[in-house]
Image (tube, rainbow, N blue to C red):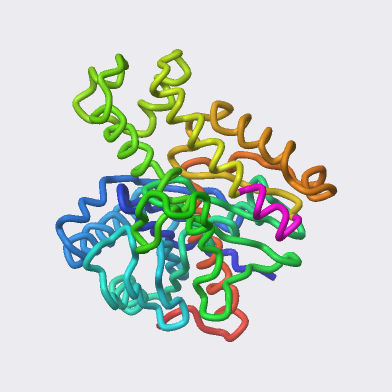
Amino acid sequence: MATTHPVLALDIGGTKLAVAMVTPDGRTHGFLSEPTEKHRGPEAVIAHLFDMGRRSIAAAGLGEPAAVGISCGGPLDAAAGVLTGPLHLPGWVDVPIVAMAAESFGVPAVVENDATAAVLGEHRFGAARGADIALYLTLSTGVGGGSIIDGRLHRGAAGNGGEFGHVMVRPGGRRCECGRNGCLEAYASGTNIARRAAEALAATDRPSSLRELPAVRAEHVSAAAAAGDPLAAELWDETTALLGQAVTDLVNVFEPNVVVLGGGVTRSGTLLLDPVRAVVRDTAMAPAAARAVVTLAGLGDEVCVVGAGALALDLAHHLDLKGTTRV
């Protein structure tokens, strides 16, 4: 029997921090989202994150959590509870986040790659519920991935499997934060969509509504493309084509029941989803293409928080079976 106690979920993103209390039905309570301000360094950001956690506990009014779940981009060592060097958090080297959270909140804690946590949340409570094989791609500050294989969370031999953002889509192309050239993340993350737009504007004098903005973000590119801006449309078409290519490759390899797309870039909705679906439909090998459902995250912007909550619920359940819930 699963735990009946609520847990605290913490998500560490490159742009924002998000926290909530999560109940066993997957619902969030006392949800908070605030800027990461990663330039302040790990000590200050983690202090802020834990303060948000305490405020969330108070706002939810459900009592103290049975455990804490943390989601963060990798690389990380989930078994050791250490952030070894997340690409979206420069300077965060060997941060013992699990020990810090356990000490701060007085309950056991667990950490997992954010997209791995997200696919668990979607499989248990969202768009991939009950799927035998499910893939998740997050399109946010970076591009991450997670997978469910044979109904179970797949982590890889060393716990960092599922780096779908580093599938090669254009050999010799744009430089990626991982050090290679041509990764999906270098084209389809929110950060790099904005960078590509800035580069395109600097390289040409073509008219574009994007020139009127003090700083171009990914959502500006998608909105301008939808409004008929030719330069923005070219950038967006390249983004969706390369994302569709990567998803097609993953569909061919895994033959999943469902591929879930989440993260801030997916707020563009069908403007992103429809062309990606079309690429998969037209280029994936049958019967993989016919079986794979490509859809948006059912948990929306709370997907990583709910995923972290699912991890903490599993930890609390395990501890319940052992007869202890405190550190």
Viewer can see residue 305: no
| Magenta stretch secondary structure, dominant | helix
Please state the horizontal and vertical placement of residue 64, each as a whole percent of the image.
Answer: 40, 64
Pick whichever, 195 or 79, lies toward us.
195
Please state the horizontal and vertical placement of residue 184, each as a whole percent of the image.
Answer: 48, 50
Q: Residue at x 45, y 26 (%)?
A: 234
Residue 21 in the image: above or below residue 294:
below
Q: Residue at x 41, y 50 (%)?
A: 173
Q: Is residue 251 magenta?
A: yes
Viewer can see residue 216: yes
Q: Is residue 249 magenta?
A: yes
Q: Residue at x 79, y 50 (%)?
A: 288
> What range of the chain is rendered magenta?
247-255
The C terminus is located in which quarter? bottom left
- Left or right: residue 282 compared with residue 214: right
Please state the horizontal and vertical placement of residue 325, each as a whole percent of the image.
Answer: 49, 78
Residue 172 in the image: above or below residue 4:
above
Please state the horizontal and vertical placement of residue 54, each as a whole percent of the image.
Answer: 30, 58
- Left or right: residue 28 compared with residue 289: left
Outermost residue on the right side: it is 287
Residue 161 in the image: above or below residue 99:
above
The N terminus is located in which quarter? bottom right
Residue 158 in the image: above or below residue 72:
below
Outermost residue on the bottom side: it is 322
